[in-house]
Image (tube, grey):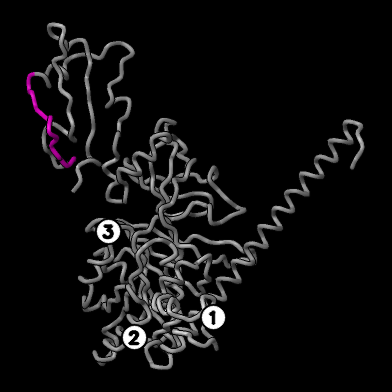
Amino acid sequence: MDPSPFRSWRYDRRPELFEGGELNGRLRDGCCPQQHSGHPHFPGSRLTHNPALSARVAEAPSPKGFKTLSSAFPSAFPHALTGYGWDEDRQNEFTRHRDAGLIPARIVAVDRGQADVITEHGPLRADTTAVASPDDPAQAPCTGDWAGLRPGDQPAIVELLPRRTAIVRSSVSRRAQGQVLAANVDTVAIVVSLEIAVDLGRIERQLALAWESGARPVVVLTKADQVADPGIVETETAEVADAAPGVDVIAVSATTGEGLEAATAVLTGTVVLIGTSGAGKSTLGNALLGDERLATGAVRAQDGKGRHTTVRRELLALPGGGVLIDTPGLRGVGLWDAAEGLQHTFAEIQELAQECRFGDCVHETEPGCAVLAAIEDGTLPRRRLDSYRKLRRENEWIAARTDARLRAERAGRWKTIAKAQRQAYKLRGGRDR
């Protein structure tokens, strides 16, 4: 492990430490002079421990108006947040916010202008008014966001740090806007129940969102114990793997423990669970957490659908490191600016398209089309091409709607500016042109 996140620097220049005109101190690089359970110790090349000097430092009073680094910055590196994903890059990024008196916090859950957050000092409830974004939901605070929190009697989130990744779907409102499901995610677990027929088209849709987010997708097929024939589980797993090139596909059973060890090995960092209601997200989450932390419910036998036992997105620490974000069931997953995600999801079609005779081939009736040739010889299933076309049309449609909305908003702003200018002319006695 790289020791740099745990490294602190101290150079004590108190007058009491000078002897004979020279500094009788040490430049120390490391977390602490002595190992103890509370702080990992990564010794530096110049780290030494001088008991006599340490005693004199402890007894020597600080000169008037002098602050040591430890008192000026009580938490140079928030070790308590490393398990939640805080790292050296975040530390450097947060410098200007710390200078402004803020402390780092990760948003656990958001609810009506308030947010539950975790800080180096423990959990807090904070106001989110300063970072609210009613006009653009994609910029609003979300579970998984890192934030700058102003501590005090009324803690408030006043800054949001840039997101490294974000799962964004099309908003359910009529406006062409994106909605962030989770932020700063490392692994997206697409949870699918084997209790009912697997919908490959839905999986491909969710894969496009996951790839577009910048995170790594994993497909987890749950309730393997509910399938009487193990051969069916193997067949379903193989079919999903064919529809998810480059993605780990794991069949698990939270009841018997089958596949959980493999799932734990690949679900690393900040993990978000997405899928329909009744897919077994919360049950899988409890198995990963090692405790019944998430509410679960029964599903209807006829269609495998369940009630929304998870009513909000929530972030929980995993026992082996990393964090888990559970999400409510997704009835519909609209694409949002997912062109790159589609390219990853249908990677084999993208590769075949490079061999088409014409560069603008749309793979319909063109001569020399490598994609159609692959369908003819059975290399590429027709279903895959149909799914790709459907999702690409949807993505292009939402992109066109977004462009139209932005054009309308820009036109509205110019109308407001022009109106204000005309009123200013009139107030000055000028002529309205």
Mark with earlier residue (3, 1): 3
Q: Are marks 2 and 3 in contact (CB under 8 Å)?
A: no
Q: In terms of depth relative to the viewer, which is nearer, 99 or 244?
A: 244
- Count neighbours of disc 3 (C-alpha within 10 A) and say few if under 14, some if 14 to 19, many if 20 or more: many
Residue 306 can be seen in this image: no
- Count neighbours of disc 2 (C-alpha within 10 A) and say few if under 14, some if 14 to 19, many if 20 or more: some
Q: List the residue tagged with mark 1.
A: 362
Q: Read off the magenta span.
A: 39-52
Gap in angstroms between the C-alphas marked 2 and 3: 31 Å
* Amino acid at circle 3: Leu
Q: Are marks 1 and 2 in contact (CB under 8 Å)?
A: no
Gap in angstroms between the C-alphas marked 1 and 2: 26 Å
Q: Is residue 218 above or below residue 15?
A: below
Label 1: state its secondary structure. Answer: loop
Residue occupying image coordinates x 15% and y 22%: 26
Residue occupying image coordinates x 31% and y 67%: 285
Q: Is residue 47 magenta?
A: yes
Specify whether 404 is left or right of 294: right
Residue occupying image coordinates x 30% and y 83%: 237
Q: List the residue tagged with mark 2.
A: 239
SS majority, magenta = loop
Q: List the residue tagged with mark 3.
A: 318
| Residue 432 pos. (x, y %) | 90, 40
Label 3: state its secondary structure. Answer: loop
* Amino acid at circle 1: Val
